[in-house]
Amino acid sequence: MLKAIGVATIDELYSDIPKEVQLNQPLKIDGFYPEQEVRSRIEQLLNKNKSAADYDMFLGAGIYDHFIPAAVKTIMARTEFQTSYTPYQPEISQGLLQALFEFESMIRDLTGVDAVNSSLYDGSTALGEAARMAIRVTSRYKILVPRSLHPDKLSVLRNYTEPVGIRIETFGMDDETGCLDLDDLKIKVNTETAAVLCEVPSFFGILDPNAVSVPSLCHEKGALSIIGFDPISLGGLKPPGDYGADIVVAEGQSISSEMNFGGPGLGIIGCKGENLLRQMPGRLIGMTTTMDGKNRAFSMVLQTREQHIRREKATSNICTNEALLGVGAAAYLSLLGPRGLSQLFETILVKTNHAIKRLHELPGTLIPRFTGQHYQEFVVTLENPRHTIAKMNQDLLAAGIHGGKSLVNDFPELGQSSLMCVTETHRPEAIDKLRATMEKFVRS
Amino acid sequence: MYRQARWDEPLIIDRSQPGKVGHLPMRPSEVEMNTSGNVMDLVPSALHRNGPPPLPEVSEPEVVRHFVRLSQENYSPDLGIYPLGSCTMKYNPKSSELAVQTAKLEKLHPEQDESTIQGILALMFHLERMLAEITGMSRMTLQPAAGAHGEYLGCLITRSFHRSKNELEQRTEMIVPDSAHGTNPASAAMAGFKVVVVPSNSEGMVDLEELANVAGPRTAGLMITNPNTLGIFERNILEIARIIHKAGGLLYYDGANFNPLLGKVRPGDMGFDILHLNLHKTFATPHGGGGPGAGPVGVTRSLEKFLPVPIVEFDGKNYYYNYNVPDSIGKIRSFHGNIGILARAYAYILNLGADGLKMVAETAVLNTNYVLSKVLAKGQYQLPFAPQRKHEFVLSAKGLSNSTGIRAMDLAKRMLDRGVHAPTTYFPQIVDEALMVEVPETESLQDLDHFVDVLTSVFEEAQSNPEAVRSAPHFTSVTRIDDVKASHPKTLTLHWHGASSTQKRVSHQEPIAQVNY
């Protein structure tokens, strides 16, 4: 090979690199282990973790422990999907393109919007991109978000909007019901508002009936409505597009993959209407035909929105996304179908309410903290001044339970509170054990 | 002779039959039903869905066959060479896959108590140290989900840096070479910077005189990849760094092209202040059909304070999160990064070690130069700029295009017929009729020779039998796709209910044409 190139050594191929920047010593890193050794080292390391397989899991807040059917994993493990890249050559990548087209179609049908892209990084960056879309379409510079927004999402949203001068304001919620404060919102939505975000269910797990009136309230002032949704909940909840959402965003991890310590996620974004579509970030897959018109075919469309063509004028810088999880979600939704998804929604709804009712009577607590109706998550508040969430979670851990996410620092107005999550993975015995451990704690 | 599978696979919605279901979730128990009460009462009526969601109704075997058939209509590095320039489509070792497929990782929640995640925190801590050593940076964050995500974070850090010196108002310009990846200008613009393009000189490198002209008090920084997208090492990199630093800007390294420098050159030693790595390129994690990837970002010591929170630290006994970083930009995404991908990269590094990584770089450069030399020996394509290349090279089919009308895209399509993926086409934009080839280290000599044969024989064919090339591909799942129709407002179809009557009618494939091409 060197002869064909016309050099004597590989070093000659590096001869143009100035000596002062060449590394003249080996990297100081551990390694060069055989496969078996690598596996056992990683195994030893990871065995120090206590996962949802070891302890009962009551954490949610954006990443959820759901049951992923074996067939989803089988399909996602197909290395033709797993190892390929963005389908720049569509004729040889029809499989991925069709799978992603089906993903986009299913999410569109579930949410009631016009178009969905083939994925963004996660739910938080989908929100960031949605806000930027709204700004470009309305030429206004204020985004309103609920007080209950996950603080990490708020931080991401700020990072996605601050450089272009967007102002983020929060609107309040009813302290008793946990539902959004429509009066506060009405005051704050004005002619400067580009969009209002509303999440159904909310971060605190509230199924807020006020949410359905937010889109029309926005439209009256010329603002757009962004609805954050939970994909599984649409097995039983009204599609946000049906009550007027202009943009929908979600974290789709729960319909494609395990928690994986929070990543990869699946950023879902969809929108209504031509104007927003032209501002959509990322890959869009369309159905077309071959040149001779004889065969149906799929390809990436409206690519002039994207960075590889439009560069600094692109709608976003996104290139690599989370396509494989989109394929997984298409498989998941196909497997569950209308019956499976409705059933799953109902199971989670029932189990959440079962847990709430079982915990409701615990002395010295307010469970649920809010009186609104709940899905999948609810807030637990400790009312005894001697009790803290930190201590309760330590007791839960000692009993083999991952307790809820502490809200103490991020939502001081809620006192000693945590956010608990229940999914289809929780058996009634797990709730019994949670209740017994919490009871022991609150009576201490 | 290559033949891609043609299944004529219908849309999954067209396989739907009422009453079928592929997976039924657990139903709640009697006890749970009784405690919770009537299901209808648990949802506010305003939020009730009218009827079940409109999804396909199919059985599990039907779903699996559908997607496995689709997978067979998808070319991938597990099937053969994938010389897509700047994408580093190397083979992904299965050892890295299996090493991380355990409930001890998959079933971890990102908000768990630190005492229950010592293993994964240790992995993240060590991976960060390894990547910092490999790149010569002080600290890294593992948060970004992709290269472009890392670039955006780099731009945010650049903003924070200038803000801390009260110069943000003044430093509004990000300099980007004309050969840069599209993500660079897009990231800079997203972060509110005005993009200033600096042209390449006759050697295909940044024109230093032009750079010195545009660098100044308005400069926030320069984003550059090295080797650049022509595959040429910017040998004036120290001078470039001096110009940018003297102007008060920061130097950003786009790690998309880092593969040929592993263990050979460190961006930190070239004067870079911020960088990202694409673990799905250089560290062999799968590309996922477009993602997930991972784009860790590294910085010099003085920029550490701006990194996203939390930072994973070790106190000699335990690993823990450090949120006490007052100047941090905050979060660039929820939680801690694409952990599944990061863990695969960790396995890859452990597997290769320092010597193995260096061998990766050298072999990639050797392979690429071998293919380049063999192709140039045929005297067909032009190679703009002097011939020394690293991991990739950009051929021009301009001469052929002028004489025959056969364009780079036609050649690329014809290459598909030979059972290889095509090079990147029409990029970088500074080369006419560009075919951008990157041959990673994982390809055998036989595969390289086959690919050389493909590159040169399609060129010959373009002259001897242009129609065969112009009408290619013939042996893929579908023939040449009508891209204009795909994006035309009148025919744009973004969902399965929007299919036009033509699209529905043509769902049946014709048999493979009998061609003697």
Image (cartoon, helix red, strand yellow):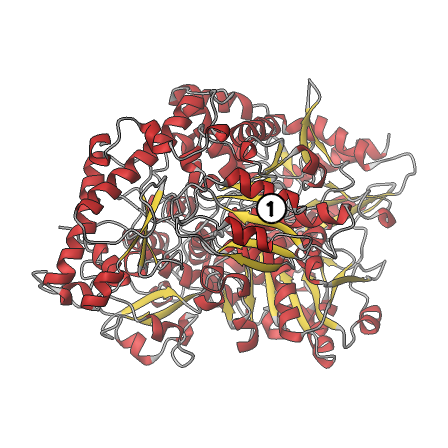
Q: Please tell me which residue is depicted at 74% across the width and 76% down the height of the picture.
A: A217
Q: Please tell me which residue is depicted at 57% across the width and 26% down the height of the picture.
A: B126
Q: Chain of mark 1?
A: A
Q: In the rendered view, tell whether residue A435 sits above or below residue B33.
A: above
Dot 1 corresponds to which residue?
A64
Name the residue type under label 1: Tyr
Badge 1 crowding class, 10 Å Cα cut-off, few under 14, some 14 to 19, many 20 or more, is many
Q: Looking at the picture, tell me which residue is in the foreground, A46 or A292.
A: A292
Q: In the rendered view, tell whether residue B178 sits above or below residue B453.
A: below
Left or right, A217 with reference to B373: right
Tell me if I can see residue A444 in this picture.
yes
| Tag 1 secondary structure | loop
Q: Looking at the picture, tell me which residue is in the foreground, A215 or B513.
A: B513
Left or right, B495 with reference to A406: left
- Residue A436 coordinates in the image, percent (x, y): 75, 34
To which quarter of the image does residue A198 belong? Answer: bottom right
Q: Please tell me which residue is depicted at 62% across the width and 74% down the height of the picture.
A: A137
* Total numbered badges shown on the rendered structure: 1
- Residue A150 coordinates in the image, percent (x, y): 72, 51
Tell me if I can see residue A126 in this picture.
no
